[in-house]
Image (spheres, rainbow, N blue to C red):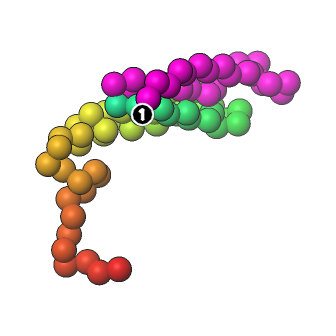
Amino acid sequence: MRIEVASITDVGMKRTHNEDYYTYLADENLYIVADGMGGHASGEVASKLAADTLVEFYQLTKDEDITWPYKMDRQLSY
């Protein structure tokens, strides 16, 4: 399957700067969109940090032998 990706963000009518952030891991087909904090201080930092943290976590736990994000616990029931 071939997937084409495009992205765009818009500052909107109320803000002076954009706080949204997006990233992707093409090899893993992982696409992340982090919405800003709605005008709070450093919202752009928060959205980038959230996306970067997800990427880092995914890369650290993508081993084939791991059931993402945690190994299966057979002691748990439905």
Q: Could you tell me if residue 32 is visible in this image?
A: yes
**Does 59 sit left or right of 48 as displayed?**
left
Amino acid type at circle 1 is: Leu
Classify residue 25 by image quadrant. Answer: top left
Most foreground residue, 26 or 32: 26
**How many badges with numbers are in the image?**
1
Vertical position of residue 29 compared to residue 64: above or below: above
Residue lying at 56% horizontally and 35% vertically, measured from the top left? 34
- Left or right? Give the position of 50 relative to 67: right
Residue at the spot of label 1? 30
Look at the picture and state if 40 lies above or below 19: below
Q: Residue at x 30, y 39 (%)?
A: 57
Residue 24 x, y percent position in the rendering: 44, 26
User: What stretch of residues is rendered in magenta?
Assistant: 1-27
Rendered location of residue 20, percent (x, y): 61, 28
Q: Of helix, strand and loop, which one carries label 1?
A: strand
Q: Nearer the viewer, residue 9 or 68?
A: 68
On the picture, is 78 further left or further right than 46? left
Confirm whether the magenta stretch covers residue 11.
Answer: yes
Which quarter of the rendering shows the N terminus? top left
Image quadrant in which you'd find residue 19: top right
Residue at image point 31% right, 38% down? 58
- Asked whether residue 52 appears in the rendered view, the answer is no
Q: Residue furthest left?
A: 65
Quarter of the picture containing the C terminus is bottom left
Looking at the image, which is closer to me, 67 or 54? 67
